Amino acid sequence: MYAELLKEIWAAVYVPNTDIIKTIEKYFHLDYTQCINGVKLNKDQYLTHVIEQRKQIKVLGFDYKHILEKKNELFACYEVIGENTQLSPIVGEVIAYFCFDGKQVLQIHGQVRLLTGNYADVDMK
């Protein structure tokens, strides 16, 4: 159940020209928090991050390697495939824990490692 929801969420967040504010409202809990590579963001900060990130990169797809679910928790390992504004390839490896509240993400805790591309393109410091 949550594996399919996760795929639906990432597809919706990174579809070009979607209303990202409505998408975040739909899929991310009011009390959403994340900690990625040690950087903590709340829902409003995450929205700002996604808006800026979408200016720098275009996500072309996801390659899900492993997904484990237990109740409302999910662990996933996947690659994000994209390109920057100069059409150079970007590939990031994501290893993350997700906690859901109903059909919304409540929390993400994970690590992202750039496999291909420039750190400046994906806002990874």
Image (cartoon, rainbow, N blue to C red):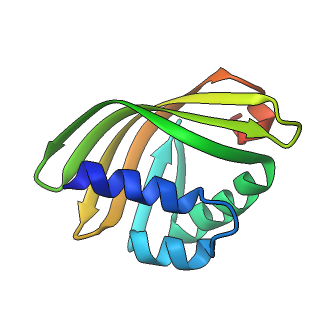
Quarter where residue 57 is shown: top right
| Left or right of 88 in this view: 8 | left
The residue positioned 35% from the left and 53% from the top of the image is 6
Q: How many numbered discs?
A: 0
| Quadrant housing residue 68 | top left
Please, is residue 99 above or below residue 21 in the view? above
Quadrant into which the N terminus falls: bottom left
Residue in front for this viewpoint, 2 or 100? 2
Left or right: residue 49 versus residue 56 is: left
Which quadrant is home to the C terminus? top right
* Picture coordinates of residue 85, whole percent (x, y): 85, 43
- Residue 70, picture quadrant: top left
Residue pushed farthest left? Answer: 71
* Residue positioned most to the right: 86
Q: Residue furthest top?
A: 115
Against 121, is 105 above or below?
below
Q: Nearer the viewer, residue 61 or 123?
A: 61
Q: Is residue 35 above or below residue 106?
A: above
Taking the image as shown, residue 62 lies to the left or right of residue 119, namely left
Tell me residue 14's x, y (percent).
59, 56
Residue name at image x 41 percent, y 69 percent: 27
Q: Is residue 98 left or right of residue 69?
A: right
Q: Is residue 22 above or below residue 33?
A: below
Q: Residue at 63% across / 76% down in the picture? A: 19
- Location of residue 108 in the rendering, given as x and y in whole percent from the top left corner: 39, 50
- Residue at 42% from the left image edge and 38% from the top image edge: 110
How far across and how far down the image is residue 100, in percent? 26, 61
